[in-house]
Image (spheres, coloured by chain):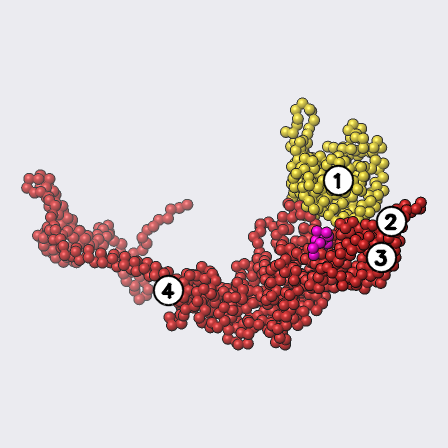
Chain colours: A yellow, B red
Amino acid sequence: MGVTVLQTFPDAFRYGYKEVEKLHTRIAHLGAQPNGVFQVDCDTYYMNQQNSQFNDIPGSGSTVNKKLHILHNTETPASTYAIIESPGKQVTLCADLMFDLLLPRLSHMYTAKKNLKVETKGTRFTVSDFIVKIGSVSMSSGQYKGILVEVEYLACSVPALCWPILREFLQSFMGFCVSSQPPPYLQARFQQVQGPQDTMQQYLEKFNEFRESSAYPVTGSLSASQPGTTSTSTPS
Amino acid sequence: MTDIRLEVASENAISEIHYDGHEVRQPPLSMSEQLSQFARRIDFSAVENGGSDEPGGKTGEDAESMEDDEEEEKPCQQPHWPLESVRNKIRNAHTEICVLHDLLQMVKEKKYLVLDLVQTPQPQPKLYIQFLSLKKSLSNASGILMQGAERIRSSQSSIARPSSDFHLDLLRLRKNWKLKKVAANIVGDLSYSAVGSNFKHNSFFEVTKSDDDVTLTTPLSALPGSSPSIGRSSLRVTVPPELEGSAYIFVCIRKDEEDLCSAQLNMLDGLATLNAQPNMSPSTEHWQQKLENAQNVLFCKELFSQLAREAVALRMDIPPLVVANQIAATIFPGIHLLIALCHSHPDSSRSRSSLTAPHNVLSNGTINELGSSSTTASSNTSTDHHSSSSLGGGVSSLKNLHDKVLEHSLHQLFHSYLKSSSPMPHPVYAPLHAHPTRRVAGPQGLDRQQLMQTVTHETLLEQIIKEAQHNFLRLRTMFVIDQLAKELKDPLIFSHWNLFNSPTQSCVRINIVTQGFDSVIRTTLVVQVFERSLRCVCRDGRVMTLSFEPQELLNLLRCQVAQHQTAAVQSFSKLMGWTVNCSEPCLGVGSAEPLGSASAVVLTSPAGNKQILVRSGPCTGVSVSVAAAPRNDFYPSAVVHERRWDQLPGAWQEVRLDSMEGRNFLAKIELLMAALTAQN
C-alpha cells in the first residue's frame, strides 16, 4: 500500500468526457498501460431526528446531524468502509463486505439519503510504480460533477518521503492545477504510514466538496460552481 | 360420597356341609366367648420370656416362677374357665411389681440397703506383650524406610552409571515419543499427524522389554541429541520392517549424463550420522537412533509421495516423469532435475552401495558417475583465477558436488510444507475452507493483488523446480563469467556475488578494469539472476533481459569488454593531453563484426601532427593504427594562422601491438602516446 494523492482536475466548462479523454492521451504519453476499470461509491446516512436530539447545539437553532458514510472501493474489493462524520471528528471503520447487510438493522438509527449517493468511475492505469485512476464523478441521478484523479505511488508508504516525486508526476500530466504544497489531508499526516483508510477518507473529503459545490448553488456557491447547475438534492 | 366400612364378614364360619349341599353354620359367638377368643390369642409366655432376661439376683423368684409356669402351663392348655391364664399372668405381674416397689422403698430409705456400682476386677497389664508389639511395629517402620532408601539409592546409581532399568528407559522414551498402552503391549506412533500430516502409512512401533544378553554397548558420541545414559538399554523397539534402514531424498540437476549439482535431504542432521556407523546391525542400534531413523524413512516416503502426486498433476511443456522412485523434470533444454527416494534396507546388500554412491541408484549404473562428476567439479572450480576470493563459499561447495545452499533451501521448503498443511485455529463464525488471510482481508483492506495471492497456490514441486532452475542458472552464470575471466587476460573481470539472496533470485556485480589503470576507468554492470532469465543493468542505465542461454550473457560481456577498451583509451587520452577527434561506439564502416558492432576512437597528439586510431571489436579484438603529418615545420601564412590547421595526416599504418612492450593494452597505448609525443 503506497501513498495516494487525490486531485481534482478542473473542468470549468463541464466538457466531461472530452477532458477525461485528454487526460488519457496525456497519461498514455508517459507510457501508461490501461489496466481495468475502477469505481468508488459513497452512500450517506443521516441519524434520525428523534435519536439525534442530543446533538442539538443550543443557541444556534440548527440540528447538527451525525452522518454515516458507507464507501466501497474496487481496489479493495473485500472491504466496506464506514466513516462517521461529526463536527471536528471522523471515525473510520474498515469492515468486511458483510457490513452492508448490517445496515438495514440500523435503519431505526440511520436513514439513507438516496439522492446523496456519489460515485466516481473510470479507467485504471499503471505506469511502473504509479497507479493512476482517472474517474468522472457523478451523483446517483447521473448528474456529472467533475473529474477526480487518484495517483498512488506503490514504492513508498510515507508521504514525506515521496511527495516531490508524486508532485512532479502529477504535474507532468495535469499541469498547474497541482499545487506544490501537498493536500491538507496529507500534510496533517505527512510523517505517518498511509493505509487504505486514508485513501477512503480523502475520497470522502473530495466527494463532500463536490456535493457542496452544487447543493447550495446560490448561498454557498464557490467559484467553481456553475450558475446553470440545477440542483435537485437538498440535505435532509 | 359414602364412607366405606371395614367389617368382618357377617357370615359365620361353616361348621358342616350336608350331602345335599346345605351348609350348616355355627351360631354366632356371644360377647364373652368373643373376648375369651381374643384373650386366648395373646401369648403371655412370649412377654414373660422377654421380660425375664434379668441376670441373676432373682434366682429364688425365678425358681418360683418356673414352678408357677409349670403349674400354669397345664391349665393354660386346658383352661377351666376362659380367662384363667390371663388372671394368672396378671397376678404374677402384680406380685413382681409389689416386690419391686418394696425394694425401691428400702433403697430410698438408705438405711438398710444401698445401691453401689459393681466393681469388676481389672486385668493385669502384660508388659511382655506390649514390648513385643512395639518391637514389631518398629521393625515394620524400619522396613519401610529401608525400602525407600534402597529405591533412592538404586535410582541414584542408575543415573550415575548406565543402567538397564526398563521403566527409566520407558520414561525417557515417553519424553520424546507418543506412547499408548494397547492391551498388554506398549505401542508408539512415529507419524507426523500431530503437525497436520495425513499420510496413510503404518507408523506404529512396539516397545518391549529386552533380555539382558542382547544389550550391547553403543558408541555414545555418535548419537545426536539422545539421552545421556546410552550404553545399555533394557528396552527394545520394533518398527515396521518397511521403515527400517535409512532413507533420504536425493535431488540432483543433471546435464546429459553428468551431475551438475546435487543435494540430499532427510530429517536427520545429514548423511554424516548414517555413514558414521555403516556396519552396525539393527539389533545393536539404540532405540532413540532407531526411532529417529524410522521416522526419517517415514518423512522421506511421505515427502516423495506428495511430490509424485504433484508431479502427475503438474502442467508443464514437458510434463515430469514419475517412474518407480524417481521424478524427472526438465527444467531447461537438456537439463533435468531428478528427485529420487533412496531407501537402503539393512538386510539387502544392493542398497548398501546406494548409500555410498547414490548416483548409481539413479542411473542404474550406466555411467561412471563419480569419475565424470569429479571432472565437472574440477572444471567448475578451476575456472576462477581472479575471483576465487570473491566467490567464496559458492565455489568451494562445488568441490564435492554437494550444494549446501540448495539443500538448505529445499529443507526450508519441505518443512514449511508440513507446517502449512496443518489447519490453523480459526474463529467459529469464519467461513470454512477460506485462506486465513482472507478472513482479515476486509478489515485490513487488502487490495486486489494481495487477494489474488491468497488464491494462487504454488505446489511444492513447482517451487522446487523454480529453485532448481535458479540454482542451475546461477551456476551457469558463474561458470560463464569465470570462463571469460580466465580467457581474457587484458581487461580483468571481477565478479562479486551478493551473499544475501532469495532462493529464486541472486545478483552479481561485474567490474571490468585494466590492471594498473583501475583508477582511470572501470566498467560496471549488474546481472540479476532469476529463474529462467537474467537481467543486466549496464552502467549507462540500459536494462537488458537475457534468456537462460549462456551465449547471450557471453556476447554481452564481450561487447562490454570491447567498449571498455575504447572508453579506457578515451579517458586515458585526457591524462596524456591528447585530443579526442571522434569516437564512435557503433562503427558503421570497416569489416563487419560477426557479433555486435565495433567501436572506434581517433586521437590527436597535443602537437597535432600525430593521430592514433583505436578500433575495438567484440570478436576481432583491438587494432591500433597511427598516422603522422608529413611535414615537421610550419610557416604561418595569411590563410593558415595556426599550425594545427596545416597538419594533414598521411596514410594509416597499423601498429603491431603484440610485439610492443607493456603488460596490457593500456600500457602499450601509453607507451605509444609517449613515443609519438616525443617525436616532435
Per the image, label 3 sits on a secondary structure element best described as strand
Q: Residue at x 57, y 70 (%)?
A: B342
Q: Secondary structure at mark 2?
A: helix
**Relative depth, front residue between B594 and B83:** B594
Query: Mark 3 belongs to which amino acid?
Result: Ala
Q: Is residue B489 left or right of residue B76?
A: right
Chain to which mark 1 belongs: A
Q: Answer whether residue B661 is magenta in the image.
A: no
Q: Name the residue at 66% across, 64% down.
A: B383
**Residue B522 is a magenta residue:** yes
Q: Which mark is in front, 3 or 1?
A: 3
Labels 2 and 3: the sequence-earlier one: 3
Indicate the amino acid at tag 4: Ser
Residue named by callout 4: B163
Q: Amino acid at mark 2?
A: Arg
N-terminal-most mark, 3 or 4: 4
Answer left or right for B146 relative to B502: left
Q: CA distance from mark 3 to mark 1?
A: 56 Å
Q: Chain of mark 3?
A: B
Q: Position of residue B636 (x, y in %)?
A: 90, 46
**What is the magenta range?**
B515-526
Task: Report the front residue among A105 and B482.
Answer: B482
Disc assigned to residue B644: 2
Which residue position holds label 3? B627
Q: Residue at x 84, y 41 (%)?
A: A19
In the rendered image, residue B282, in percent from the top left (x then y), is placed at 47, 71
